[in-house]
Image (tube, coloured by chain):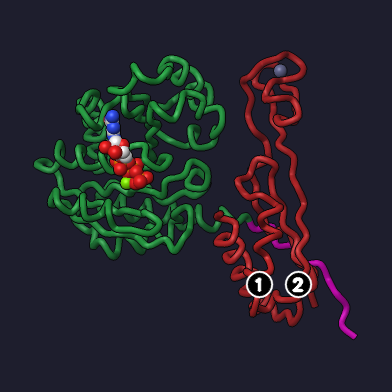
Chain colours: A red, B green
Amino acid sequence: MHELGVIIEVVKYVEDFAKKNKLTKIDTLVLQIGELSAMIPRYIEACYPAAVDGTMLQDTQLKIEILPANAICRECGSVFNVIQNNKVCPNCKSEVWELLCGREFMIKEIVAY
Amino acid sequence: MNTYKIIEIKESIFSNNDRQADKLREELKNKKTFLLNLMSSPGSGKTTTVLRTIEALKDEMKIGVMEADIDSDVDASLVAKTGAKVIQLHTGGMCHLDADMTKQGLDALEADGLDLVILENVGNLVCPAEFDTGSSKNAMILSVPEGDDKPLKYPLMFSVVDVLLINKIDAMCIFDFDIEKVKERVKKLNPNIKVIPISAKTGEGFDEWIDWLRNEVKAWKE
Ligand SMILES: Nc1nc2c(ncn2[C@@H]2O[C@H](COP(=O)(O)OP(=O)(O)OP(=O)(O)O)[C@@H](O)[C@H]2O)c(=O)[nH]1
Ligand SMILES: [Mg+2]
Ligand SMILES: [Zn+2]
């Protein structure tokens, strides 16, 4: 499971960010994860407590927002959700498309003071 | 009383790694060291392929190998017997290598002056695809017993690699594995990919693979 290693990186980044910006308490950490990312939200949530243990984020709440896997069809230009449409353009049935989003793994924002 | 505020960060977890990877690639370019990132499932034949590749090229170039097995040095000691420089990377249970770990590995290998460094990444088709190691080129091995449906199941891996080696073709008659179907599936994901069927056991297909690698190493130095 690679989620733990990655979430530890996230925690380091946020701690660093908090120090630089002189924040004393972080209430909430908001992550954005694409539907096609190899990070599984359920696993992230499961290893989050271990990753924040003993850090500044120990009492910080974790929130995860899921970003849809949207693609644009190279044949007809329609934008559609790749997962819901089984990787086929619902308009023209083409399988040639370009992914617009869905692989992200982002620290979106923090709620802090 | 302090009030909470929302602070936007918008930092991609991968972008930090991507920056480090680009920097490492540039350093390697300046040092004229070609780094090949070799990825696959466990047991697909990475080490066997690496051994035969070293045998084929060791008289023309200086070669180093970094083995990223999670928890043993079996592969590293096999490679050391060829006379190539080799180190074992300890990934501490991580299922992939990132650019920073790769850089540390290159330092430990004392890679300056080497023409070619092969990184045997952790055996896994998911996570290594997400993390740019800073390599010059990415290669992947798919072995015949794994089945020809893998490009459907792990599309990201097949879309990030420059070359796909289909290994264990000596065992083709035992498995129903359709090379043409794989090529078709893979080209849909990655039109520029080079597909080379090989057998690390018999050496079949190695001429084409070695030619590809030799040319890439040469081009990197220009
Ligand atoms: N028949 C056949 N067997 C092969 C071939 N290449 C490798 N093998 C066998 O497959 C097994 C695994 O090969 P390795 O080279 O250790 O594979 P690997 O990918 O390095 O394995 P890990 O490092 O454990 O993930 C060994 O028993 C090899 O002898 C091949 O081309 N044909
Ligand atoms: Mg091996
Ligand atoms: Zn369409």
Residue furthest out toward the bottom: B1
User: Label 2 is found on which chain of the structure?
Assistant: A
User: Label 1 is found on which chain of the structure?
Assistant: A
The residue under the point 63% across, 50% down is A39
Q: Which residue is mark 2?
A: A60
Q: Is residue A28 visible?
A: yes
Do residues under tags 2 and 1 come within 8 Å of each other at their CB atoms?
yes
Sequence order check: which comes first, mark 2 or mark 1?
A: 1
The residue under the point 50% across, 33% down is B159
Q: Is residue B10 magenta?
A: yes
- Foreground pick, B158 / B12: B158
| Residue range (magenta) | B1-11
Q: Which residue is mark 1?
A: A52
A15 relative to A69, above or below = below
Judged left or right of residue A86, residue B221 is: left
Q: Quadrant of residue A57?
A: bottom right
Q: Amino acid at mark 1?
A: Val
